[in-house]
């Protein structure tokens, strides 16, 4: 990205923002810049010496507790803050202007600030207006826009290489793990911007939550939505046996198979809003989902009677037993929700294959296969003595 400069607007000595009308006359002052390192405070957490006296909570200690030594007096570091101290009366507001730029030593970085800010706001209004229905009230439009903003905000760069994590840092002792987490997923190499659940609380992805996320994202950014499903089904994510990774703490767990539904809906949404049909995306993900469907049939139908198991499958989040493991008395649970998810999987794959068959008749045979499989599942649900 190259170098960037952050310009922080000066404030008046009495706490009023620079440029604000005030009865008092005072010279503007540059706000103090606080620098530290973005490193863990090992002394506080583990009782061992820190490599540097300037750790990641140093800015907090300087601002909250007034500890001057918590920040670097040389004003260098990997974490920095601009310290504003403002008096704000009840019902009033203060505005602080910041500008991130690729240009150094701007003589007046805030001269065009208001006009630029107004233009960007207008552009954002125009962007979201195309997704607003005339029937929506102003309040409903605001809720919709906040929801879209929430989805965009919770995107995060996610980097997790299982093989490296299992091996440990080459400069540190080899990890001693009796039960190494995700040891059977050494192929998995996460290095993407992903839609996370809520990066403040859940700093990891979950496959079926991610699939649900792609539906609203497809409305405002179909390319990003498509890239999510393309990634989750690629060979450096999907297990060689066809399983899709569930979530970080246990990739081998089972999530509801909603990726085919999400793929089909993204394809339809892009058609409806943008007037284009990305058949390459549809076919690419469909081919990978064939592997995942086969994994479900071979691994999660233990008795071969089209009644499925699975574990945590979402329609009932609370259970007496761990449904991902063998029962305490032995045996396993046949799940109506797992079976219904698979019926839905068949219907979604049928819809995709019929769409692809419009240009490639090879998919006609695949369509009939999923239609037949749906009937098998429906018959099992209606007549199985186990249910």
Image (tube, rainbow, N blue to C red):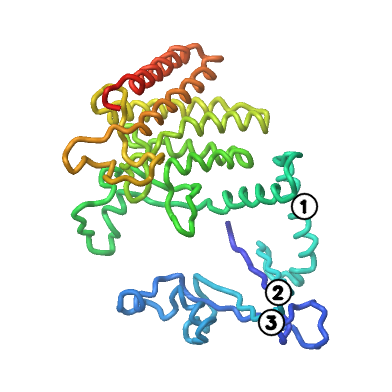
- Residue at x 27% of width, y 26% of height: 386
Q: Which residue is mark 3?
A: 87
Q: Is residue 102 above or below residue 136?
A: below
The image shows a total of numbered marks equal to: 3
Q: Nearer the viewer, residue 380 or 142?
A: 380
Q: Residue at x 51, y 31 (%)?
A: 263
Q: From the image, tell me which residue sits under label 2.
A: 9
> Within the image, what quadrant is residue 6 found in?
bottom right
**Residue 232 image offset from top left, x and y in percent:** 43, 39
The front one of 81 and 317 is 317
Please tell me whether residue 130 is drawn above or below residue 374 in the rendered image: below
Kindly indicate the quadrant of the structure image that contains residue 275: top right
Secondary structure of the residue carrying numbered label 3:
loop
Which image quadrant: the N terminus? bottom right
Mark 3 vs mark 1: which is more N-terminal?
A: 3
Categorize mark 3 by other alpha carbons within 10 Å: few (<14), some (14-19), many (20+).
few
Residue at which label 1 appears: 122
Q: Say the numbered circle drawn on residue 176.
A: none
The nearer-to-camera label among 2 and 3 is: 3
Given this view, does label 1 or label 2 mark the residue nearer the observer? 1
* Foreground: disc 3 or disc 1: 3
The residue drawn where x is 70% and y is 79% is 88
Could you tell me residue 316's position as x and y percent? Answer: 38, 42
Q: Earlier in the sequence, mark 1 or mark 2?
A: 2
| Crowd band around label 1 with a 10 angstrom C-alpha radius: few (<14), some (14–19), many (20+) | few
Which comes before the other along the chain, label 2 or label 3? 2
Which residue is located at x 67 percent, y 73 percent?
Answer: 8
Residue 379, percent from left and from top: 36, 18
127 left or right of 362?
A: right
Circles 3 and 1, Cβ within 8 Å, touching? The answer is no
């Amino acid at each position: 990205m190259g170098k960037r400069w952050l310009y922080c607007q000066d404030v008046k000595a009495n706490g009023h923002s620079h440029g604000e009308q005030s009865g008092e006359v005072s010279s503007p002052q540059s706000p103090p810049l606080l620098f530290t390192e973005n490193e863990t405070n090992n002394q506080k957490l583990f009782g061992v010496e820190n490599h540097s006296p300037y750790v990641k909570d140093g800015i907090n200690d300087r601002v909250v507790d007034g500890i001057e030594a918590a920040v670097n007096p040389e004003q260098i570091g990997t974490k920095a803050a601009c310290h504003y101290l403002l008096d704000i009366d009840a019902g009033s507001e203060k505005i602080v202007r910041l500008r991130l730029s690729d240009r150094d030593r701007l003589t007046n970085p805030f001269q065009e600030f208001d006009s630029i800010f107004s233009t960007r706001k207008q552009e954002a209004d125009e962007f979201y207006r195309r997704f607003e229905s005339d029937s929506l009230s102003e309040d409903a439009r605001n809720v919709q826009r906040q929801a879209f903003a929430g989805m965009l905000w919770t995107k995060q760069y996610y980097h997790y290489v299982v093989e490296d994590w299992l091996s440990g840092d080459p400069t540190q002792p080899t990890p001693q793990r009796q039960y190494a987490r995700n040891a059977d997923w050494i192929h998995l190499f996460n290095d993407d911007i992903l839609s996370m659940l809520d990066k403040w609380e859940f700093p990891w992805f979950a496959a079926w939550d991610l699939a649900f996320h792609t539906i609203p994202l497809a409305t405002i950014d179909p390319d990003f939505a498509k890239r999510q499903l393309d990634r989750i089904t690629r060979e450096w994510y999907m297990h060689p046996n066809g399983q899709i990774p569930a979530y970080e703490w246990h990739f081998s767990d089972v999530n509801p198979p909603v990726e085919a539904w999400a793929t089909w809906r993204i394809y339809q949404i892009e058609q409806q809003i943008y007037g284009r049909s990305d058949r390459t995306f549809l076919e690419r993900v469909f081919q990978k989902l064939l592997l995942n469907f086969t994994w479900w049939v071979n691994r999660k139908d233990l008795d071969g009677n089209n009644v499925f198991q699975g574990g945590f499958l979402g329609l009932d989040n609370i259970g007496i037993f761990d449904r991902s493991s063998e029962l305490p008395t032995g045996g396993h649970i046949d799940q109506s929700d797992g079976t219904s998810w698979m019926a839905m999987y068949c219907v979604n794959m049928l819809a995709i294959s019929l769409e692809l068959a419009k240009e490639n008749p090879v998919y006609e045979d695949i369509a009939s296969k999923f239609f037949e499989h749906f009937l098998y599942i429906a018959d099992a649900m209606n007549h199985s003595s186990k249910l």
